[in-house]
Image: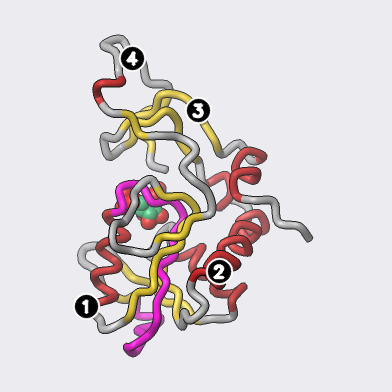
Amino acid sequence: MTNPDLMALLQAHGGLSAGLTRFRNGLVSDGWIEKGSLFATPVTLDRVAAQQARAVAQAFPDATLLVGAPACGAVPASAVARHLGCRVAYVLLQPEAAWHRMNIPKPPERVVYIDDLICTGQDACLALHFLRQEGHTVLGVSAWISRAALSGEQLVTLAPPPFRLLDASELGPDSTFEFQDIRE
Ligand SMILES: O=C(O)c1cc(=O)[nH]c(=O)n1[C@@H]1O[C@H](COP(=O)(O)O)[C@@H](O)[C@H]1O
């Protein structure tokens, strides 16, 4: 079966909403992605996982462990690991970074951190810091799309962000938000 790429799937499943958007974290954008449009149907999500698995295999052929953070990173991490036949572990980020007890990997593993959508990059940075503190080698990060650059890290994405963040100077006094309180 052919694997339609991420953007085509988001488009086909109504996951791309153009329009002035205020995120829950205060950032403003000219649109937003509803990833739930893909998460809701595991068969569809798996097509993205196949694409992400190919990207991980190409960029990080020596990876021994994939890591994702609940809630939204753990699902793709597991799906990608299934395609690659490798192991997976989950890092909890709240109230502080820690392994989920299901798998506490013994260092040193060569780890790729897996995510869906990275916005500010705060969670990814927390997770990478934890992984290094735990004695693992972080090879890099694989995400569907990232709005943040994650400086100093090898970040591999499936597509560039379809919407851009706007700064205050780009908003007029009468700007009206089409979407409010959004968490991608
Ligand atoms: O995992 C989450 O809690 C989560 C829920 C949600 O509704 N939206 C969402 O983006 N996330 C996660 O939050 C992280 C992105 O937030 P930043 O830390 O701002 O980059 C990613 O790990 C997402 O998977």
Give the structural element (helix, strand or loop) at label 1. helix
Q: Is residue 119 magenta?
A: yes
Secondary structure at badge 3 equals strand
Residue 55 occupies quadrant: bottom right
The numbered mark, 3 or 1, whose residue comes first in the sequence reads 3
Nearer to the camera, 23 or 61: 61
Ligand 1 has an atom within 8 Å of the beta carbon of the residue at disc 3: no
Question: Residue at point 38% right, 45% down?
Answer: 147
Task: Give the amino acid at mark 3.
Answer: Ala
Q: Could you say which disc has been placed on residue 18 in the image?
A: 3
Q: Which residue is mark 4?
A: 175
- Disc 2 designates what residue? 80
User: How far is mark 2 from mark 4, CA to CA?
Assistant: 41 Å
Identity of the amino acid at label 4?
A: Ser
Residue carrying label 1: 133
> Label 1 crowding class (10 Å Cα cut-off): few <14, some 14-19, many 20+?
few
The spot of residue 65 in percent (x, y) is 44, 79
For residue 74, side relative to residue 10 (left or right): left
Asked if marks 2 and 4 touch (Cβ < 8 Å), the reply is no
> For numbered disc 2, what is the local secondary structure?
helix
Q: Residue furthest right?
A: 1
Q: Residues in magenta?
A: 100-121
First reached walking from the N terminus: tag 1 or tag 2: 2
